[in-house]
Amino acid sequence: MTRPIDSVTHAASDPDADQPYAELGLKTDEYARIKEILGRRPTSAELAMYSVMWSEHCSYKSSKVHLRQFGDKAPKTDALLVGIGENAGVVDVGDGWAVTFKVESHNHPSYVEPYQGAATGIGGIVRDIISMGARPVAVMDPLRFGAADAEDTRRVLPGVVAGISGYGNCLGLPNIGGEIVFDPCYAGNPLVNALCVGVMRHEDIHRASARGLGNLVILYGAHTGGDGIGGVSVLASETFDADGPAKRPSVQVGDPFMEKLLIECTLEVLHEGLVEGIQDLGGAGISCATSELASNGDGGMHVWLDRVPLRDSTLSPEEILMSESQERMCAIVSPAKVDRFMEICRRWDVPATVIGEVSTGGRLVIEWHGETIVDVPPRTVAHDGPVYDRPMVRPAWQDALVADAPTPARLARPGTPEELRATLMQLVASPNLAAKDWVTGQYDRYVLGNTVLAQPEDSGVIRIDEVTGLGVALATDCNARFAKLDPYAGAQLALAEAYRNVAVTGAVPLAVTNCLNFGSPEDPGVMWQFAEAVRGLADGCLELGVPVTGGNVSFYNQTADVAIHPTPVVGVLGVIADVARRVPMGFASAGDSIYLLGVTRDEFGGSEWAHEVHGHLGGQPPAVDLVGEKLLAEILATAAREQLLIAAHDVSDGGVAISVVEMALRRNVGAQIAIPAGIDPFVFLFAESTARVLVAVAPDHEERFTRLCAHRNLAIERIGTTLAVSELNVDATFTVELAELRAASAATLPALFG
Amino acid sequence: MSRVVVEVMLKPEILDPQGRAVEGALDRLGLVGVTSVRQGKRFEIELAGPLDASRRERLNELAETLLANPVIENFTVHVVEDA
């Protein structure tokens, strides 16, 4: 394939050449703006760069105007060392330690090729963390699929889970939590989000910028191939078009062993102070890394693109710029330190090549065999892309949805003991509430030896200092049905649940990340959902005093004009001074008192019961109570520090009944529950009111604990006792053997996925 | 008896980490001049009786859905013996 190089000179001499900007995902006015910036038509290489960097995925062009609220409404905190805008936010956790964490989506690639899509999702988020200078210590995966028994779910789920375990286990990172949710709204649009957390000393924080005239640009890691060319702009910007084979990119394939070398090599060159700036290569590959590094730095960079080592020698310069080959990084290194940098790369068996240098003049210039094929102001590529304040309209169906409340007249409720027992058994075995061991059993949860808690616990807890016992807790949550009913409240409820899941371990919630999965921003109804969710999350974070440190937006999760439920996945990170005092979820011994903290109301809108038993979604989600969440978290942290609690567990999906079952099954300790006077048994057992937690307290600590709660006016009610027999006994209502509950819970996923 | 061989290879543009690992090992073990290794799968299938059109069709379908992942792999179905 020999064709003339479309150089800058050539572009100037042939100004009216037809260019496939529309096929590359650019709108006519965006193409016109590129011409205006450059004062000529772009070369094909420039067009490739702009198209991929101005895609929704890279430029956040539809979300930017809303995401500003995370900065504008950020609560005052001393904990944030690096805020939004860098590869990942960095949080101070004390004793000179800092933690960085971020969650990203890899939804579309995982639908095309589940194994590699999910695997490279882990690879990408891990490189984000190492480019901040941190050592990755754990990953988590919030996953969402279509109906559990759907054909497509059977194709996608096993591949996704195998990809996560294949890559993460080879890399030697524990997978400490996440979510698995089934809902028909995700059919054809599974959500595969990946979170990574990394740890570093304060002095090791690094940022992505290219400074220092004459410093060299080094590309290191895997060779560049035809992986995912156009993947970012084509896959993330438009919906799937089955009849477009020409658009099908070649799937990126991950190599976790190369990534492991990249981690060690990168941490070593950073630790020796050999690097002025660093950036991982993910979506948009070299286009993204060079333009972002140059834009964040002194503003100029000269790149010799023909020096990039290739896996496939037939790649065109445009393809090299767009390639999303995995396991690559880009570093800015001063000439005096290049030899040492190269020596370290050689020792780790990591190929490294000088491909350019930092220059004056504020231009990003890229050469291909002596001809200039790119000459652009880097800011216009990386940061000053188009920004859209897209039209938003509250969907017409929203009122009817909210009006369709799950009242007793609308949805039949179980009343007799037999019906209540049957409801419990149905929910315990439902795909969303059933045991997830079939999935988490494929993940290495304890490698590295610092995992304190992992799934099915409420949070993953990792020890980061072996001497002091300092650790962090992480949880991700989102009930997208709540967000569908009310995106503002739904985002706050996702935040509240993740916050509570961190708090029950005894950790103090400190910072937030998010992965906002939505339909098409070009649909005013979806845009309204997005804006409401962002507003809700920003307001919620302000009220709880936890800043958003970064995140990711994934749009176009829809098939034709049917969007997924708005799914703002929220991750909360907390710190615990001594992991030896963390509180697990399971009952541990007979004779402990079980207390319910918080208030139960008749709240079933968007509940698991309405979804599973009636296939119903309507009404209002449970009331948000952030004041209550904060109080609860403070009391739980104090109680954990003073070692007053045997167990603590969040009450959410499926209500008190499901939480009690989970606490009992964890260590096979039975419980007797008394339904409090004055409340309907069904409401008590299954309502999903928020700001509630169940705790188990040993008899000798009861007085101190109840006094602590009373002192702060936290609603607390003793609802039962742990038993020496392996059964769940709901007073005067029904009894179930734990073995029967366990069998029902454990059978569901293996039956579906083998 | 009929014999069919199905060969499955990653598409040329797809990264083959296993092939790369073998390539590195060959070099370390002293084989000079190795420039590329690609690793694939070979299925030797024996069937009783002749291959009529419908069995051939079903075989091709299963090669595409079970034996190979056409998103990242190419495959060939080769009838060695048809009796």
Image (spheres, rainbow, N blue to C red):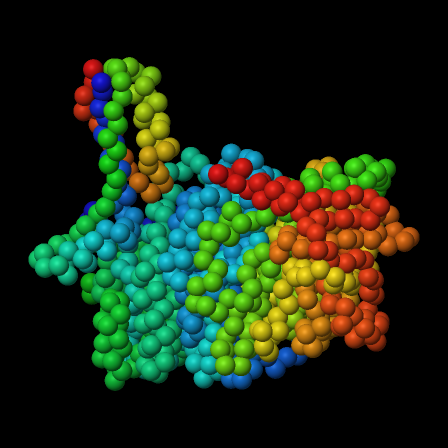
Identify which residue is drawn at 22% across, 20% down: B2
Where residue A79 sits, quadrant-wise, is: bottom right
Q: Position of residue A92 (x, y in %)?
A: 55, 79
Report the number of numbered marks.
Answer: 0
In this picture, residue A292 sits left or right of residue A590: left
Q: Which of A581 and A5 lies nearest the eye of the viewer?
A: A581
Q: Position of residue A662 (x, y in %)?
A: 66, 53
Q: Which of A243 and A98 lies nearest the eye of the viewer?
A: A98
Q: Position of residue A406 (x, y in %)?
A: 80, 42
The residue sitting at the right extreme is: A678
Q: Position of residue A657 (x, y in %)?
A: 74, 50
Where residue A624 sits, quadrant-wise, is: bottom right
In this picture, residue A724 sits left or right of residue B43: right
Q: Which of A38 and A734 lies nearest the eye of the viewer?
A: A734
In this picture, residue A459 sits left or right of residue A661: left
Identify which residue is drawn at 24% across, 72% down: A347
Identify which residue is drawn at 68% across, 64% down: A647
